[in-house]
Image: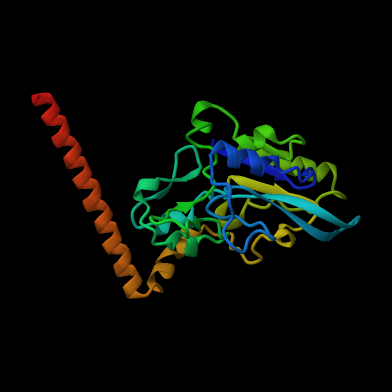
Amino acid sequence: MPAGMLIDTTKCILCLRCENECHSFYGLPNKRLEGTDDAPELDAYHYVVLQAHEVATPTGRRTIGVSKRCLHCFSPACASVCPVGALHKTKEGPVVWEEGKCIGCRYCQNACPFDIPKFEWDVAWPKIQKCIFCHEKRLLQGKTPVCAEVCPTQAIRFGERADMIALAHQRIAESPEKYFNHVYGEEEVGGTLKLYIGAVDMRQLGFPSEVEPEMYPEYTHEFLSKIPIEIASLALFLGGAYLFRSRREAALAKQNHDTEKRG
């Protein structure tokens, strides 16, 4: 069964630990891209960002915290359009990227319905960055993702996706006056590993208002057909350059290895 995560916005106390601990764990640069200081958004240097939204709820207006990050779709559109396989879905469920493969074409940015992959605009050889569900550093070692481990109110819960869905529906059923009756991510874009519940519709907390229930890779052909031929050609060129560079580096490594053996 794939891993899953339930984020209950009714339990968030805006402590920022999910954002700060993730930032520290991955040693991300302590900066935000210009223009995002006043309204925190996901960027190439923040895999998780905590946002505060003042909204009307059944019990009056209140400030609700929501921990934003990649939702890790069952069938990710970002991976389906990546021409070099830099983004791909693992057998455990998380959608991860191989940094050395990324050619910076940004197809994934355009394809993602949640606007998640972010580009390193201010470096010489930019890459796409996003939450990777602590896949290699924690999940494969049987550990809980950092954000869930440090959450003091258990607003972020981790487990098997089926169990997280059951827990979400249980909370809604037990306290219908407290929750909006919907588990965001259970069916959106064919289902996601990250799930959200709360007092209001998640669209009031900045989630996209028009998301299809179908898996988005079904629209990949339509998306690619609308890309100008010049951009598509550039992506093919960059992909070829990447393959050439990779094979050259492999050949040099083999040559050095053979030289050392003869020496």
Colour scheme employed for the rendering of this structure: rainbow
Q: Quadrant of residue 163?
A: top right
Q: Quadrant of the N terminus?
A: top right
The residue depicted at 16 percent of the width and 30 percent of the height is: 257
Residue 150 visible here: yes
Position of residue 6 relative to residue 128, above or below, is above
Q: Quadrant of residue 201?
A: bottom right
Q: Please, which residue is most extreme toward the left here?
A: 262
Residue 196's spot in the image, x, y percent?
A: 69, 49
Q: Quadrant of the C terminus?
A: top left
Q: Quadrant of residue 167?
A: top right
Q: Is residue 34 left or right of residue 262?
A: right
Q: Is residue 63 above or below residue 254?
A: below
Is residue 72 shown above or below 166?
Answer: below
Left or right: 34 with respect to 204? left
Of 126 and 182, the residue lying toward us: 126
Residue at image position (69%, 44%) is 7
Q: Is residue 161 visible?
A: no
* Numbered circles on residues, count: 0
Could you say where residue 104 lies in the image, as x and y percent from the top left? 39, 59
**Of the pair 137 and 203, the residue shown nearer to us:** 137
Question: Farthest residue toward the right?
Answer: 59
